[in-house]
Structure formats: C-alpha cells, structure tokens
Image (cartoon, helix red, strand yellow):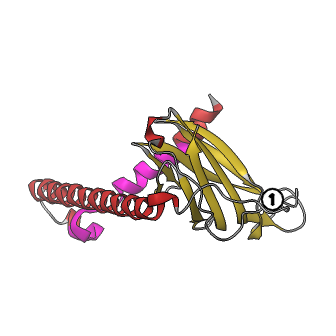
Amino acid sequence: MRLIQLVAVPFALLGVAACARYPLGMSESEFKALSAEQQLEARSKQAELDTAEERRRAEELAARRQERAAYMARLNAGGVFAGPMLGPWGGAVPYPVPVPVPSNPIASAYSRILIVGGVVNVPVGDGLVRTRRDWRPALPVPVVLAEGETALIEIERADRKPGSNTLRVARLSGTIVVGYDQEIYPLAGTYPFEISGVIRGAVISIAPG
C-alpha cells in the first residue's frame, strides 16, 4: 500500500501541472478571455497538435532504432565482432575479437548478455549523503533474458565501495534494447558500449542462451 501511495503522489502532481497548461501557448489571461466555445476549440486544436507530435516522435524513434539495428547488423556480418577476450584484470580488450557467430541466434529462446570494462557513473563522497557523482571502474554484469523480457540491472563499482547505477535491458522483437534511450543491438556479437550518464568505455557481448 505504501508503494502505491508513493507512486500516486507524483502522478497527482503531474495531473495538476497538466491542468495548469493552457492550449496553443496562451497565457492564463488570454485563455480566460475566450468564450467557453472558443476554449473548447483551442483545447481540441492543442490535442490534435499533441497527437501529431507524439506520432512524429514515435516515427523518429522507430527510424533511429531501425537504422541502429541495420548498422549493428552490418558490423556483425561475418562475425567481425563476437565474444570479448578478457584480460587478467577481468576487463575487455579494447578491440574486436574475430570468432564465429551463430547462424541463427534468433532461434534461441534466451540471450546471454555480458557487460564488461568501462566506468560507471556513481555517487561519491564522504558521509551518508553523497550528492556528487563521478566515474569509477565498473564490475562485469551478466544477465540472461527471454524474448519479451525486461530487467533492471545494477552496475556496481569494481573497487567494492558503495555505489551503483541502474540500467534497463530488454530483449524485444529479436533485438537487445538497452537504456531508456533504447540503444539497439543484434542477438549475437560484441560491440562498444556507452549509455549516457550510466556507463562508458565498456563492451557488451550478446550470445544465444
């Protein structure tokens, strides 16, 4: 019940903020100067504009995802990128390692994902309240996903000190989708890996489960 209450408060605030917005860029005085019929017409036009903008953003996102998937598929053709070679320190060698790639990874019910190397953006500082953030070496993170499954994974600091960052990873429509910006990767291969504000300089390795 407490969780529901905590979630309900932000949505209530969002509802208040939404109600305070006047259509077509009008100020409060401009909107209230309209007749009831004109206000209804203005809100209707704003709704049409909002719907068109949402459609445009969805189409733009779909185009970016398709372009990214095609680009990654070209990189992956012929097994140019595949499972990472690990150094004695557990980090990924910063160059592609040519090894065979399965011919049909989509046929596998599961995908094994490994994120290695790089640095993670975490809270740092002394005391219980740490408001400053900085980049620290990251521990490797393994995860196994089925088609349609989404996981929130914690990327922890390699120095074992407190501090981690959360990353959303999903297997959707025969691709691996990472982060809320929805970076797209094929179901087999190893690629340079960077998610803004979370991790950079890492490698993501994907293989059938």
Is residue 154 shown in magenta?
A: no
Residue at image location 61% in from the left, 53% down from the top: 167
The C terminus is located in which quarter?
Answer: top right
Is residue 28 shown in magenta?
A: yes
Residue at image location 20% in from the left, 61% down from the top: 49
Q: Quadrant of residue 132?
A: bottom right
Give x and y (percent) for residue 103. Answer: 46, 45
Give x and y (percent) for residue 75. Answer: 46, 65
Neighbours of disc 1 within 10 Å: few (<14), some (14-19), many (20+): few
Please state the extent of the stretch shown in magenta in the rendering: 9-30
**Which amino acid is tagged 1?**
Gly
Q: Which residue is tagged 1?
A: 90
Residue 181, can we see it? Answer: no
Circle 1 SS class: loop
In the displayed structure image, the side of residue 91 where residue 30 appears, left or right: left
Tell which of 134 and 125 is nearer to you: 134
Q: How many marks?
A: 1
Residue at image location 59% in from the left, 56% down from the top: 99
Give x and y (percent) for residue 71. Answer: 40, 65
The N terminus is located in which quarter?
Answer: top right
Q: Quadrant of residue 65?
A: bottom left
In the displayed structure image, the side of residue 5 where residue 14 appears, left or right: left
In the displayed structure image, the side of residue 190 where residue 171 appears, left or right: left
Above or below — where is 6 with respect to 202?
above
Name the residue furthest top.
1
Give x and y (percent) for residue 142. Answer: 69, 46
